[in-house]
Amino acid sequence: MPPLLTFRTQLVRHPTGLLAAAAGPEPLVWLRRGQGFAASGQAARYETAGPGRFRRAQDWWDGIIARSQIEGPSLVPGMGPLALGSFSFSDTSSEPSLLIVPRLVVARFRGHEWVTSAAPPGQAHPTLESLLPDADPPAPLPHLTQRPGPVPADDWPGVVRQAVQLIAAGSIDKVVLARSVVAESTGGLIDPRIILARLAERYRDTWTFAVDGLIGATPELLARSVRGLVTSRVLAGTIRREGSDQADLAHAGALARSSKDLEEHEIAVASVVSALEPLTEELSVPDGPSVLHLPNVMHLATEVVGDLRRSESGALPGVLSLVEALHPSAAVCGTPRPAALGVIERLEGLDRGRYAGPVGWVDQNGDGEWGLALRCAQLSSDRRAARLWAGGGIVAASDPSAELAETEAKLLPMRQALGLA
C-alpha cells in the first residue's frame, strides 16, 4: 500500500515573523510570545461530531501517521507531521469538530526553526511562495457595525439572576454562561490576518489561534502533553484592569481575597484534578492561585502539573485523550457537569459551536498543546460577519451587574482586533 502522505521537515532560519506564513483567507495559527506554528493549505481534513469525537479524531490522526512516509528530524514536540484542530463545546452541537493537516507549516519552538510540508506521493512539496495567493498583502478591515446576539447586554443581568436562583435552589453549584455580539461588514471582506497580527502583538502571553475561521487569543491552557508530562493552567475568577499601576495593584489584591472568585476558582481546579488523577502517577497542585495579569483583565490562575501514567503496554495517553477527559471543565461549563450543561442550553439561547471548546495541535507522537477557545470570534463562511463571545462563571455570590461588566471586559480583545474599540 503506498503512503497516504509524505511529510518532509527541514531546519531553516526564518527572517520574518511566523504570521507571514499564515497565507490566504483561512490561516492556521497557534502562536505565543513569537513561538509556535503558522500554516497554510490543507493536505488532509477530518470532521466529526457528537460523543466520542475526540477518540475518533485521534484514531484518524493515528491512521494518517501509520500510513505516511516521514522524512527529516523530530527534535522537539511539534516538529514533523502536525495537525491543528478545534472541537465543539457540546456533544449536541450542530457544528462539526475538525482536525486539519496543513500542506505547509512554518515553526519556531524551543530554540528550533523549521518548515514541514505534506504532499501525496509523487507530487511536489509546496513552498511558502506557492501557497501565497499572488502575494497579496492583508486587506484593511472594512467598517463594521455591531448587533447583539440572542441575549442583549441589557438583558444579561436577568439571565445571571436566573442562574443564581438555580444555585440557591441547589440545582447546580456553578455555571459558566456566555453571551455573543455580532460584528457585520458594511462593505468588504474581513481578512483574518489583520486580526491575528493585532492579537499576537497586544496579547503576547496568550495563545493566538486560528482554525477554520475561529480566531482568538486564549489565556487558558486546557492540556499540554510533552513526553510524559501534562500541564493544565486553570483560570477562573476575573477582574477588569483600570489602566493604572496603582489601581491594578489594588484590584489584584481584591481579586486574591474575593470569596466569590476564590470559590469559583476552587471549583474549576477541583474539576481538572478529578479528571487528571486517573491518568497520572502524581499531580502537583499549588496551595492557592496566583494572579495572572493580561492587558484587559486579571485572572486567578493555578497551574496543575502531573506525570502521565503508562498503560499495561507501556504507552502514554495522547494529548487528545487528556483533552477528552478534561472537557468540559468547570472553568467553561460548571458543576455538576450534566446539570450545568442543561442550564447553559436553556439560558444562552444559542449553540456555542466551537466557542469554549478545545483548540490546539497534536504531533506524530501524540504530544501537543490544547487551549480553550476563549476571547475569540467565529467568522462567517463569506467573511462578512464575525460572532464574538464572552462568558463568566456564576456562583451563589455573583452580582449580575458585575457579571455584565466582566463579559464586556472579555469582549475587548476581539473588539480591539476588529477595530471596534
Image (spheres, rainbow, N blue to C red):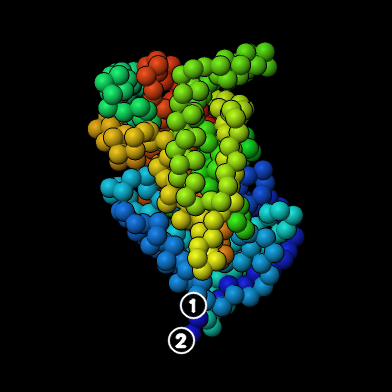
Picture coordinates of residue 250, whole percent (x, y): 62, 13
Res 279 visible? yes
- Tell me the residue that label 2 is attached to: 1
Front position in the image: 373 or 319 = 319
Residue 370: mark in rendering: none
Q: Residues within 10 Å of mark 2 (few under 14, many from 20)?
A: few
Amino acid at pointer 2: Met
- Give yes or no for contact between labels 2 and 1 (Cβ–Cβ under 8 Å): yes
Front position in the image: 382 or 122 = 122
Residue 67: mark in rendering: 1
Q: CA distance from mark 2 to mark 1?
A: 8 Å
Picture coordinates of residue 280, whole percent (x, y): 53, 51
Q: In the rendered view, would you say 331 is above or below 97?
A: above
Q: What residue is at 42 percent from the left and 66 percent from the top?
A: 59
Q: What residue is at 26 percent from the left and 21 percent from the top?
A: 169
Q: Residue furthest left?
A: 346
